[in-house]
Image (tube, rainbow, N blue to C red):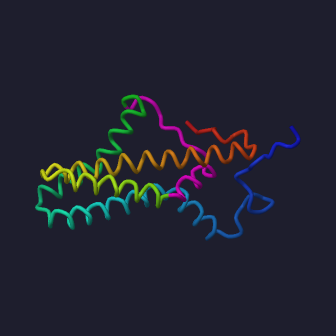
Amino acid sequence: MGDEIQHDDRDDDADGRSPSALVRGLRSTVGRESTTFGFSILVTVTFGLMQTMTGSPDVARIFLFAVGSAMSFTLLEGLLSKGFRSSMPQHRTRIQAIGTSLNVVSVVGGLGAAWLVGEAVSHPAAWALAPFLAGVVYLMLESVETALGERLFAASGDRRAADVDP
């Protein structure tokens, strides 16, 4: 067991603290907000894509878009929390950092899904379906990316790679 690599989330300085409050704040903010930032990008570019493909939306289509965007999270949270009865566990920030650093893959994947909807559906419902499907694809790809991070750390000998906080 002496060959096993032990990873620790506190690897900046001997005391586990980043060299400055600014660096600590930046690490905390980027780590905490990466998925949200990627989703914000996705929603923005999906709206632009739909507008380019179908023309400027009326008020009803804008509301459809907002509902479709939010429903991707609502549906998946409802399913994964067993009807909102179970907590949603979180990986350690080290694992999440690898997954969320690949946001470009999940953003482009989600945008591709929205583009397919825009090409295939001419009904106003496309304004709800495109962001909904884009969000689901985004979240699925983010999950694959996080699983990849988990596997990379596990392969390097991190026995806690699969640990999640309840």
Task: Tell me if 77 is positioned left or right of 155 in this view.
Answer: left
Q: Is residue 101 above or below residue 162?
A: below
Q: Is residue 89 above or below residue 33?
A: above
Give the image location of residue 113, x and y in percent: 32, 52
Task: Tell me if 34 is positioned left or right of 134 in this view.
Answer: right
Q: Nearer the viewer, residue 67 or 154?
A: 154
Residue at horizontal 17 percent and vertical 58 percent from the top: 62
Range of residues picked out in magenta = 84-102
What quarter of the picture does the C terminus occupy? top right
Q: Quadrant of residue 2?
A: top right
Residue at horizontal 25 percent and vertical 49 percent from the top: 68
Q: Quadrant of residue 78?
A: top left
Q: Is residue 99 above or below residue 159?
A: below
Give the image location of residue 116, x and y in percent: 27, 53
Q: Is residue 1 above or below residue 128?
A: above
Q: Nearer the viewer, residue 11 or 45?
A: 45
Residue at horizontal 22 percent and vertical 56 percent from the top: 118
Give the image location of residue 152, x and y in percent: 66, 48
In the rendered picture of this protein, how many numbered marks are placed on residues?
0
Residue at horizontal 39 percent and vertical 57 percent from the top: 39
Give the image location of residue 19, x and y in percent: 71, 69
Asked whether 93 falls inside the magenta stretch, the response is yes
What quarter of the picture does the N terminus occupy? top right
Asked whether 144 falls inside the magenta stretch, the response is no
